[in-house]
Structure formats: C-alpha cells, structure tokens
C-alpha cells in the first residue's frame, strides 16, 4: 500500500473531536491553520483489536476500583521479550498514569530541591518542565550534529557537566525525541558507565521504542552490558505511541 492509499483508507479528520493538537492550537499560537507537529499522536483510528477489546471490557466489567491485572504485567513482559529481546522480571514493574507523571514521581522520590538533572539536548520539552516545576535545575548537555545531520554525544562534555553540577539524575530518551536517534548498546554503555561512576540515577524514557524507521534496532537500556546498569536505572514506556492511544 502506498502513502496515498494508506491515507485514503485510514486518515481521519480529528478537528472538532476535542483533539488537543487541532482544537487547542488557537490557545497556544493564536491561529488555527498550523500543522500540529508538536504533539506526537496521529490522525488514524487505533487498531481494530484494541477498539474491540476496550468495548468488550466495558460491556462485561463493572467499572469499580481495580487492582493491577496480572495479565497486563504478563503482556508487558511478553512484549519486551518478543519485540526487543529484553527479559523483565515481574517484580520490577509498576504502573503510572503516563510517562511524564512517572518521571515527576521519580524526580520527587530520588532528588531534592535544587538538585541537578541532566538531559542531552535538544530533547522533549516536558523533561525540562517536569524538572523546573519540581524546583530542580536542568543541565542540558548539547549533542553535536555531524555533517550527515546525525546527532552524537560529546562524552567528555557529558561527564564534565555531571561533575560540575553534581548531577543526581540523567533523563535519557531512546529513541531520542526530537532528533530521532536510536541509541546503540555501545553508546548507552558509555553514557551509563559515566553515570555509574558518578552515582547518577538513570531514567530511560523508551516510549517511542516501537516506532523505528532506520536500520538501528531499538535496544532497551535494561539490556545494556547484560543488565549491568539495572540497579540504577528506571525504564519507562507506554502503549500510547506504539498504538496511537494517548488518551
Ligand atoms: C519522549 C516522550 N516521552 C513522553 C511523552 C509523553 O508521554 P505520556 O503521554 O505517557 O506522558 C512523549 C510525548 O510525546 C514523548 O515524546
């Protein structure tokens, strides 16, 4: 199926459906004619199997308070294994309303007011706002842009920034939003060993793990160096990007 055929079959005009990116853009930009590329959701219906599963659940189940369904944990473990060859232990898992909430919880739990939190910039803006809202300092370490337009890390600058600011937490983004870089195990090993050396906790935001278009496969931070960093690492993901179900 080519792009035109795909679009004809699946495109849906979300304007007027309380879509944040379409129906709120006048609040952000005071105009309504922009292509809203600042929000990572799509103008397609979710997969049919998800629609059906939600409908079946709602028809069959009382909507009272629930505990975590063990099948949910099993599904996450199975997905990571089958798609990313990553073995997860059930006890490692917990859930949050969404990734940014989980990041905010970790910032609150593992850092103190004014602590420094490092990111590789440019990076997804909510890392910055979650940090500043919590009254922590954001330390943006710029990535270098190569001649072929690829981004890379200046490892010396990364380590120097960690030492200078006494960084407590590094928020890693893999694949990296917005530059699209899919981090290799070797790159992460270098980054994480610097973090380990300086006792920096790592959050790996892996929310875009299933949307890989290039040749580099996704590697979860949990598998880097045979799991050597799992004691100082919190990996986060969500169904929202993979299946276009952010709401
Ligand atoms: C890298 C990254 N992390 C997190 C989010 C937001 O995730 P959530 O809606 O689960 O908070 C986005 C949304 O675009 C994102 O690009």
Image (cartoon, grey):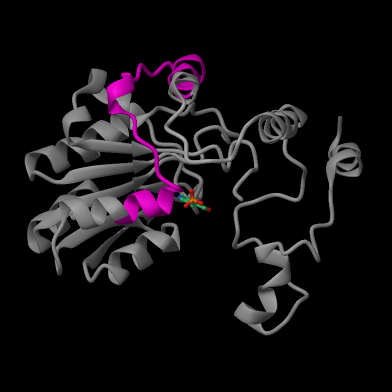
Which residue sits furthest bottom?
30
Which residue: 84% across, 41% down? 10
Percent x, y for residue 22? Answer: 72, 66
Residue 123, compared with residue 213, is above or below; it is below
Q: Is residue 192 depicted above or below 33 in this figure?
A: above
As for residue 50 lying within the magenta part, the answer is no
The image quarter in which residue 31 lies? bottom right
Picture quadrant where residue 47 is located: top right
Identify which residue, 224 or 100, lies in the foreground: 100
Q: Is residue 179 left or right of residue 228?
A: right
Instruction: Please provide percent x and percent y for residue 241.
Output: 58, 42
The reply to whether residue 117 is in sight is yes
Residue occupying image coordinates x 47% and y 26%: 69
Residue range corresponding to the magenta coloring: 76-104
Residue at (39% x, 54% y) in the render: 101
Quarter of the view holding residue 51: top right
* Residue at the image point whose x is 51% and y is 19% from the top: 83
234 lies left or right of 31: left
99, above or below 161, in the image: above
Horizontally, residue 18 falls left or right of residue 205, namely: right
Report whether residue 145 is seen: no
Callout count: 0
Q: Quadrant of the N terminus?
A: top right
Residue 127 picture location, percent across and down: 37, 59
Q: Is residue 87 magenta?
A: yes
Q: Position of residue 18 (x, y in %)?
A: 72, 64
Viewer-side residue, 49 vs 127: 49
Most frequent secondary structure within the magenta stretch: helix
């Amino acid at each position: 199926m080519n792009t035109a055929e795909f679009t004809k079959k699946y495109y849906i005009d979300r304007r007027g459906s309380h879509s944040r990116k379409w129906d709120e853009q006048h609040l952000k930009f005071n105009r309504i004619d922009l292509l809203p590329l600042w929000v990572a959701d799509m103008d397609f219906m979710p997969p049919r199997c998800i629609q059906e599963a939600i409908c079946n659940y709602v028809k069959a189940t009382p909507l009272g308070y629930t505990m975590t369904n063990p099948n949910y944990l099993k599904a996450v473990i199975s997905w990571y294994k089958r798609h990313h060859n990553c073995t997860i232990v059930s006890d490692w898992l917990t859930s949050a309303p969404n990734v940014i909430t989980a990041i905010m919880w970790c910032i609150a739990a593992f850092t103190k007011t004014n602590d420094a939190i490092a990111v590789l910039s440019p990076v997804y803006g909510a890392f910055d706002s979650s940090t500043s809202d919590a009254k922590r300092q954001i330390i943006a370490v710029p990535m270098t842009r190569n001649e072929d337009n690829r981004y890379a890390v200046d490892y010396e600058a990364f380590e120097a920034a960690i030492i200078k600011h006494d960084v407590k937490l590094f928020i890693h983004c893999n694949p990296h939003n917005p530059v699209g870089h899919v981090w290799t195990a070797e790159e992460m090993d270098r980054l994480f060993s610097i973090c380990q050396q300086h006792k920096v906790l790592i959050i790996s935001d892996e929310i875009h793990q299933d949307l890989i278009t290039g040749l580099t496969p996704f590697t979860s931070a949990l598998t880097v160096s045979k799991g050597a960093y799992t004691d100082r690492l919190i990996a986060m993901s969500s169904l929202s990007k993979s299946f276009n179900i952010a709401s």
